[in-house]
Image (tube, helix red, strand yellow):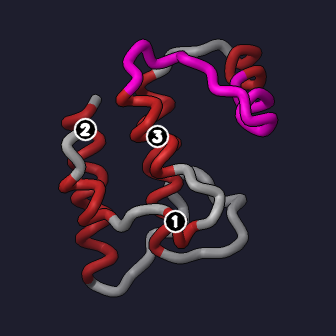
Amino acid sequence: MKKWFKQMVSAVDYIHENILIHRDLKRSFLSRYGSKTDVFSLVLIFADLCAVLTWAEREMIFDNYRRGIQSDVFGHPHTAEFIELLTQVDPDNRPPCKAILENPF
């Protein structure tokens, strides 16, 4: 999963280097677009690949997240920390693709 995610981030980084924004990495409901929107979409895809869950489990985890309750569905604390870093509510607090690629995770 990590290798695939790194390849996706590299591809999006290439797009961003060319001053383009993908905007639709399967999360087209986002209203404010920018390169950090693509980062958020990437991590949602990554989290989806890492955690095979039923629809009900996904809803419960999302509800818990909105309440500030963390759910350990990844079985590895660094995965959850990495995902939390990339899903900051304020897009300005999300790292750019270059920083993601340099992250030791």
Q: Are marks 1 and 2 in contact (CB under 8 Å)?
A: no
Q: Say which residue label 2 marks.
A: 105
Q: Are marks 2 and 3 in contact (CB under 8 Å)?
A: no
Q: Residue 21: x, y in percent?
A: 44, 76
- The mark nearer the N terminus, 2 or 3, is 3
Instruction: Place residue 37 in its image quadrant.
Output: bottom right
Secondary structure, mark 1, is helix
- The mark nearer the N terminus, 1 or 3, is 3
Q: Are marks 1 and 3 in contact (CB under 8 Å)?
A: no
Q: Residue 15: x, y in percent?
A: 30, 73
Q: Residue 93: x, y in percent?
A: 51, 65
Within-10-Å neighbours for mark 3: few <14, some 14–19, many 20+: some
Secondary structure, mark 3, is helix
Report the quarter where the C terminus lies. top left
- Which kind of residue does numbered mark 3 sit on? Ile
- Give the side of residue 3 with respect to residue 70, left or right: left
Q: Work out how far the residue at label 1 is from the one at label 2, CA to CA, in angstroms.
A: 18 Å
Q: Which of the pair 23/100 is nearer the observer? A: 100
Q: Say which residue label 1 marks.
A: 93
Secondary structure, mark 2, is loop
Q: Say which residue label 3 marks.
A: 83
Magenta region, residue range: 61-77
* Residue under the image location 19 percent in, 55 percent down: 102
Report the quarter where the N terminus lies. top left
Instruction: Place residue 81 in its image quadrant.
Output: top left
Q: Which of the pair 104/35 is nearer the observer? A: 104
* Residue under the image location 64 percent in, 26 percent down: 70
- Outermost residue to the bottom: 19
Instruction: Place residue 71 in its image quadrant.
Output: top right
- Give the side of residue 93 with respect to residue 105, left or right: right
Within-10-Å neighbours for mark 1: few <14, some 14–19, many 20+: few
